[in-house]
């Protein structure tokens, strides 16, 4: 996930992450957060944990970073506000058990849909297919492709909270199939 960091509190957070293990939690704010955005509005308790894999610090102190998701976590409690950014205690959220053969079949179907999208995505679609071709874990492949293609924040949060890999694959496949149908419809309208 590419992020542009410009708020002073998040600049401080990224500086601390870069000085440490380069890990950060990314939580979604609960709907209705706007009036308390400058403070500490409530967040959804399931968040993503990511590692900063690339960073560009700009002359004015802003950052462009690339974060690779590595885990899901539950926010157990927030620590007292000793920094301008939020710090929390987290517990890992693992995947439920699943049938590996069924998961591979589901991921193969998902990737087939994604490959059909490649002509609509241009160079980024080709790059995505190249990246996933190197994945050996179907769950990692699914999560990587879903992250790249699914922009709807509600669907992304639903995927993050879904601990069954087969269910995640079904949700992602359905969403991406709808996206492909819309892209094909739009292309037909142009022609």
Image: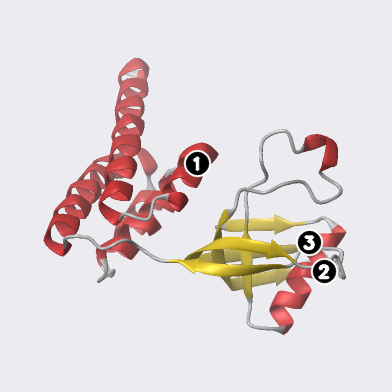
**Residue 152 visible in the snapshot:** no
Please tell me the numbered disc located at residue 12. Answer: 2
Q: Mark 1 points at which residue?
A: 151
Q: Which residue is drawn at 45% across and 50% down?
A: 161
Using residue 158 as the reference point, say whether residue 164 is left or right of it: left
Q: Which residue is drawn at 76% across and 76% down?
A: 16
Taking the view exactly as shown, the residue that stands out farthest to the top is: 189
Q: Distance between the residues labelled 2 and 3?
A: 5 Å
Q: Name the residue under label 3.
A: 10
Instruction: Name the foreground residue: 70 vs 56.
Output: 70
Q: Are marks 2 and 1 in contact (CB under 8 Å)?
A: no
Q: Distance between the residues labelled 1 and 3?
A: 22 Å
Q: Which residue is drawn at 70% across and 76% down?
A: 17
Using residue 32 as the reference point, say whether residue 53 is left or right of it: left
First along the sequence among labels 1 and 3? 3
Instruction: Name the foreground residue: 182 vs 80.
Output: 80
Q: Dot 3: few (<14), some (14–19), or many (≥20) neighbours within 10 Å?
A: some
Quadrant in which the C terminus is drawn: top left
Helix, strand or loop for disc 3: helix
Residue 91's x, y, as percent? Answer: 54, 69
Using residue 181 as the reference point, say whether residue 57 is left or right of it: right
Helix, strand or loop for disc 1: loop
Q: Distance between the residues labelled 2 and 1?
A: 27 Å
Q: Dot 2: few (<14), some (14–19), or many (≥20) neighbours within 10 Å?
A: some
């Amino acid at each position: 996930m590419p992020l542009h960091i410009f708020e002073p509190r998040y600049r401080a957070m990224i500086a601390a992450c870069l000085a440490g293990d380069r890990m950060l939690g990314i939580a979604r704010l609960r709907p209705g957060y706007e009036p308390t955005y400058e403070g500490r509005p409530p967040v959804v308790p399931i968040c993503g944990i990511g590692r900063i894999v690339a960073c560009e610090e700009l002359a004015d102190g802003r950052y462009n970073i690339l974060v690779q998701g590595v885990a899901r976590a539950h926010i157990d409690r927030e620590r007292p506000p000793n920094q301008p950014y939020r710090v929390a205690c987290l517990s890992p959220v693992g995947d439920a058990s699943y049938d590996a053969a069924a998961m591979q079949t589901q991921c193969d179907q998902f990737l087939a849909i994604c490959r059909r999208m490649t002509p609509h995505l241009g160079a980024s679609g080709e790059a995505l297919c190249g990246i996933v071709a190197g994945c050996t874990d179907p769950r990692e492949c699914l999560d990587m492709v879903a992250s790249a293609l699914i922009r709807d924040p509600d669907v992304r949060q639903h995927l993050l909270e879904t601990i069954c890999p087969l269910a995640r694959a079904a949700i992602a496949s359905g969403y991406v199939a709808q996206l492909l149908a819309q892209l094909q419809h739009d292309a037909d309208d142009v022609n």
